[in-house]
Image (tube, helix red, strand yellow):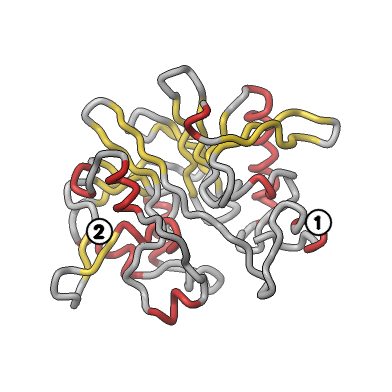
Amino acid sequence: MFGVVPKKLWSRTNPADSNNLCPWAMRSLLIEDGDKLILIDCGLGDKQSEKFFRHYHPHGDDSLEKSLSTAGFSLDDITDVFLTHLHFDHVGGAVEWNDARDGYRPSFKNAIYWSNSRHWKWATEPNARERASFLSENILPLQESGQLKFVNASDDDLRVNTGLGFDAFVVNGHTDAQMCPIIKTDNGKTLVFMADLLPSVGHIPVPYVMGYDTRPLLTLEERSRIFNEAADNGYHLFLEHDAENEICTLTQTEKGPRLDNAMRLSDI
């Protein structure tokens, strides 16, 4: 999760257990906007094999369906599912077994699923590095169902209009054409869903790039640009993978952007 950063440094914020593992979240975001109920990313799902799950040690009682129910909604209430990218820990919950368990269907039967054509091609014709992260059973049923639509994101776009009431940063270092939504809240805050551009507060120094990133030097450029914009403009950054912190803000220092505050979503 921390690439070439020495363990002595990253373990200050993310201490590992005896197996060198750290706890992580797969945190989704639900947006209620008029008659739209938009879900951003949908976690790991539960349809993979026991062997697959043993690699990642899922734990705890949280689930996407349970969290939606707590908020007063069901899977069928979701109108749109916005996928930042199609790695299994972001899209796995988008697809479930059918009743006969001999095939798959979208988990959200009334929703439109949103990706972009650049990333879709990248995911369905995967490189050797990412092949294990792009699982066909998580991806192809979305297209086969007719529920898939694409945001227009050209090769040169740094920011796109999603058509869902918010823009998104387009970043290419982690995987090609990952999208990070930029949401204006009712109280005037700017909330950026950071996906894998910033997994946790432990990844805030710009050089703390994950070993999963396909083009780490490009990630450095993207993180520098967006972190500086966030620090200068007081953005609230939504952390998908931080097990403890849901939101953080950045501040400018002589060493570049650093953590300002960490908080819960309800605090803003």
Q: Is residue 190 visible?
A: yes
Tell me where residue 9 appears, x and y as whole percent. 81, 56
Percent from the top left, x then y, of residue 233?
Answer: 63, 22
Q: Give the label on residue 143, or none.
A: 2
- Observer-nearest residue: 158 or 192? 192
In the image, farthest residue toward the left: 100
Q: Secondary structure at mark 2?
A: helix
* Residue 29 picture quarter: top left
| Element under disc 1 | helix
Q: Residue at x 69, y 59 (%)?
A: 2
Mark 2 crowdedness (10 Å alpha carbons): few <14, some 14-19, many ≥20? few
Mark 2 or mark 1: which comes first in sequence?
A: 1
User: Residue 156, can we see it?
Assistant: no
Q: Residue at x 40, y 59 (%)?
A: 61
For residue 161, which quarter of the picture? top left
- Left of 23 or right of it: where is 181? left
Residue 121 rendering spot, x and y as whole percentages: 40, 59
Instruction: Report the front residue among 85 and 155.
Output: 85
Residue 249, compared with residue 13, is above or below; it is above
Q: Which mark is residue 9?
A: 1
| Amino acid type at mark 2 | Gln
